[in-house]
Amino acid sequence: MICLSCAHKDTKVTDSRVVNEGMAIRRRRECPKCEFRFSTYEEVEILNLMVVKRDGGREPYSREKMERGIKKALEKRPITQEAFRMLSAHIERDVQSKARADEITSKDIGEVIMHHLKSTDKVAYIRFASVYKSFEDIDSFKQEIKKIT
C-alpha cells in the first residue's frame, strides 16, 4: 500500500484486527521511510452478481445503490455511522447468501433490506416499505403499520 504522506510504494502492517463482528479487517500500517501511521479497512465486496429487475432487465449489483436507499429511509433517524456500516454489511451478507447462480432479484434484495430495517428502526422500515411496496391506498399502508406494532 502506498504511504498517504510521502507516497512511498510500500508500507508495513503493524497490526491486524477483525472488526464489525467479523465483517471487516482493520490494519494498522506504518511507512518505513517517513514513519507515518494510518489504518486501512478491508471489507468483502460482492463481485459478478447480477440483479434481475421487476421488468426483467438486468444490472450489476451496486452496494452504493443499496446504501443510498437505506440512507433515505434512515434520514433524520438516530443511527450512528458504525451502526449503519454494520447494517450494510449484514444486508450484503444476506444478499450474497440468497443469490442463486450469480443472480438475485430486486424483490429478494428489497425483502432482505426490509427484514433488517424492521429490527433496526421501525420508522425507516415503514419509509422503505412505502416505496418498495408501492401502497395503492391508505388501508394497505395501515395494515403494514399494524404488522410492526
Image (spheres, grey):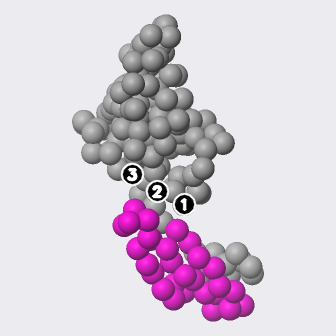
**Overall secondary structure of the magenta stretch?**
strand
Q: Is residue 22 left or right of residue 134?
A: left
Say which element carries label 3.
Answer: helix
Q: Distance between the residues labelled 1 and 2?
A: 6 Å
Q: Quadrant of the C terminus?
A: top left
Q: Do labels 1 and 2 touch, CB within 8 Å?
A: yes
| Picture coordinates of residue 139, whole percent (x, y) | 44, 10
Residue 17 included in the magenta stretch of the image: yes
Q: Which residue is drawn at 56% across and 72% down?
A: 40
Most extreme residue toward the left is 100
The residue carrying mark 1 is 82
| Picture coordinates of residue 111, whole percent (x, y) | 36, 31
The residue carrying mark 3 is 90
The residue carrying mark 2 is 86
Label 1 neighbourhood size at 10 Å, few (<14), some (14-19), many (20+)? few
Question: 23 or 72: which is nearer to us?
Answer: 72
Q: Can residue 8 be seen in this view?
A: yes
